[in-house]
Image (cartoon, grey):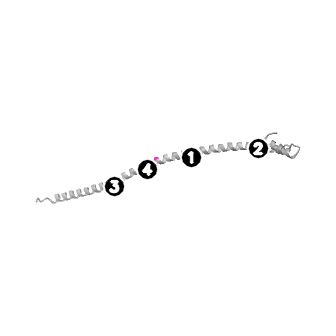
């Protein structure tokens, strides 16, 4: 064996320690990089799922808004139809009330009870 000076031995030992330290640091950083890579892939998958869910929600929201608008339109149409029906019923009621008032106010014609009853029936039927 060759005898090396002390400084060479120390330098060799220091180089070995430095190499071992660098190797350990490299391995620690490689493990850290692997963990970060896994976390990054998980985050990318989560982001992709989030975007997909967001698109589905947007589609569902649009469909719901259209359904709500359709119900509003249908409700407005029903309200308008009901108002028209009520208006025509009000007219029919007014006509019927006027006819009833005319029948009450009209003098009953007839010589006897039977002819007076037929007079009222004929008037109610519109035959005078």
Q: Is residue 95 above or below residue 13?
A: above
The residue carrying mark 2 is: 96
Percent x, y of residue 79: 65, 45
The residue carrying mark 4 is: 50
Gap in angstroms between the C-alphas marked 2 and 4: 67 Å
Q: Which residues are magenta?
A: 49-55
Percent x, y of residue 22: 25, 56
Label whose residue precedes the other's in the sequence (4 or 3): 3
Packing grade of label 1 (10 A; few <14, some 14-19, many >=20) is few
Label whose residue precedes the other's in the sequence (3 or 2): 3
At 23% from the left and 58% from the top, the residue drawn is: 20
Gap in angstroms between the C-alphas marked 4 and 3: 22 Å
The residue carrying mark 1 is: 68
Q: Nearer the viewer, mark 2 or mark 4?
A: 2
Gap in angstroms between the C-alphas marked 1 and 2: 41 Å
Percent x, y of residue 113: 86, 46
Q: Nearer the viewer, mark 3 or mark 1?
A: 1
Packing grade of label 3 (10 A; few <14, some 14-19, many >=20) is few
Secondary element at tag 4: helix
Left or right: 126 as drawn, with respect to 19: right
Q: Nearer the viewer, mark 4 or mark 1?
A: 1
Give 70 or 19, whichever is nearer the viewer.
70
Give 64 or 97, whichever is nearer the viewer.
97
The residue carrying mark 3 is: 35
Label whose residue precedes the other's in the sequence (4 or 1): 4
Q: Nearer the viewer, mark 4 or mark 3?
A: 4
Residue 95 is drawn in which quadrant? top right
Majority secondary structure of the magenta segment? helix
Q: Extreme right residue here?
A: 111
């Amino acid at each position: 064996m060759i005898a090396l000076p002390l400084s060479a031995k120390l330098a060799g030992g220091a180089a070995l320690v430095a190499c071992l330290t660098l190797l350990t640091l490299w391995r620690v950083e490689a493990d850290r990089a692997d963990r970060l890579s896994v976390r990054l892939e998980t985050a990318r998958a989560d982001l992709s799922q989030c975007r997909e869910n967001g698109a589905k929600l947007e589609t569902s929201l649009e469909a719901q808004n259209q359904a709500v608008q359709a119900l509003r339109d249908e409700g407005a149409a029903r309200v308008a139809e009901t108002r028209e029906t009520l208006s025509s019923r009000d007219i029919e009621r007014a006509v019927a009330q006027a006819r009833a008032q005319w029948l009450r106010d009209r003098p009953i014609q007839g010589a006897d009870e039977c002819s007076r009853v037929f007079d009222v029936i004929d008037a109610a039927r519109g035959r005078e």
